Image (tube, helix red, strand yellow):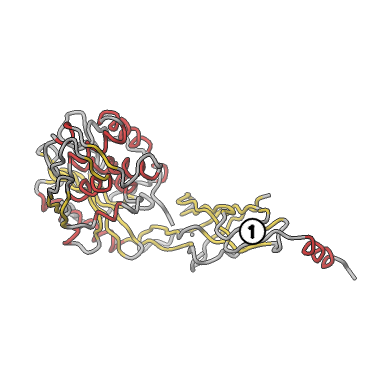
Amino acid sequence: MNKILCFIAAAGIVASAAFSAATNNKICASADSGDLVEGCRSCCLADAYSGEVVYEENSHDRMPIASVCKVMTLTLCFEAIEQGKIQPDQLISVSERAAGMGGSQVFLQSGLEYPLSDLIKSIIVCSANDSCVAVSESIAGSEEQFVAKMNERAEQLGCRDTLFANCTGLPKDTQYSCAADVAIMFANLIRHEDYFKYSKIWLEDFSHPDDRTTSMTNTNKLIKKYSFCDGGKTGFTNEAGFCLAATAKKDNLRLVSVVLGGQTSDDRFTSVVNLFNYGFANYKNKIVLDKTVNLNEKADVLNGKKEEIAIHPERNCYVFSANDETPEITFNAEIETIKAPVRKGDKVGQIEVYKNGIICDTINLLASEDAHKANYADNLRKIAGNWCL
């Protein structure tokens, strides 16, 4: 039997939002914040975990996004690794087609083999088109099949104004997205912690198997110019203008900022910084469940030396809100009655977190201690303890 508990958060800590599917994205009206965006056609500022949008201009206007489309290319790479379909140290053979891609590149040599991790790094740091095609062919068999997977994944994430035609972002008439969709896709990408192994690299040499080196410089200038920024993806074509999707973290608050259609490169960087500063000045992420703190309720144990054990959330839970807002936080915990033996860290239930009556996160509940199975002597003692003398 499961124990279901509903309770309201007190002023102190009692579990963290993770950006997930589009059903969790809440679109807010544009804030009355003055002119934050300079020289860009559209923008979107959102909390990276909940997906809540706090500032937007023309955020659903469809337009080309140039190399920002590599956000989805990278997403499929990291997901393929996590699913065990490919390994980071796996050698990728470069086709003539991949080596012949124009635009930004690291000058891969056809017929040579490169570690997947190096190709991913080159995509993140210097937006290498040749690396994009090489990994797409390796993961899906062809770029065309890979692009079909890109569109399928975008649809799963709830991106309704996005259509990919290639994995590089090079100009193609049938390719478009919008600032709101890019924010969703980029927030999903940065859930993969390995992304940040490469996103903060400013300058590094790319080593080729034939002993050549190619110097890579990060296209995201905010890595050096804005202390809270630790990742981003730039893009530029004549059709798309100057584009940027970036993330920045200050204290517990991680934001995603997107600008598209900038008139100059400085416009996109200045606008994203303005959006970040506005977000950090006016919003917060408050911790409402701490993974290091046990819940007041315990899990019942059947046939164990202990009749109940302490439990805790698997991870922290943060609730996003404006600084001047005090949302009502409520919880619905479903705690399983478990059979011994139980090991510390075993899943024993889950807890739902609600903000103003709307679910914003679901977190597993874990055992905080072991519960060994009761033996014959233990059972005798329990029986004896229940006798009335």
Image quadrant in which you'd find residue 335 = bottom right
- Residue at left offset 80%, top offset 66%: 381
| Viewer-closest of 135 and 366 | 135
- Residue at left offset 52%, top offset 59%: 313
The residue carrying mark 1 is: 299
- Residue at left offset 25%, top offset 52%: 257
Q: Is residue 200 above or below residue 75?
A: below
Q: Residue furthest front?
A: 210
In this image, 270 relative to 294: left or right?
A: left
Mark 1 secondary-structure assignment? strand
> Picture coordinates of residue 89 (x, y %)?
31, 47
| Viewer-closest of 238 and 303 | 303
Q: Residues within 10 Å of mark 1 (few under 14, many from 20)?
A: many
In this image, 317 relative to 107: left or right?
A: right
Q: Amino acid at mark 1?
A: Ala
Q: Which quadrant is home to the C terminus?
A: bottom right
> Picture coordinates of residue 378 (x, y %)?
77, 64
In this image, 297 relative to 279: left or right?
A: right
Q: Residue furthest bottom?
A: 389
| Viewer-closest of 80 and 270 | 80
In this image, 295 relative to 255: left or right?
A: right
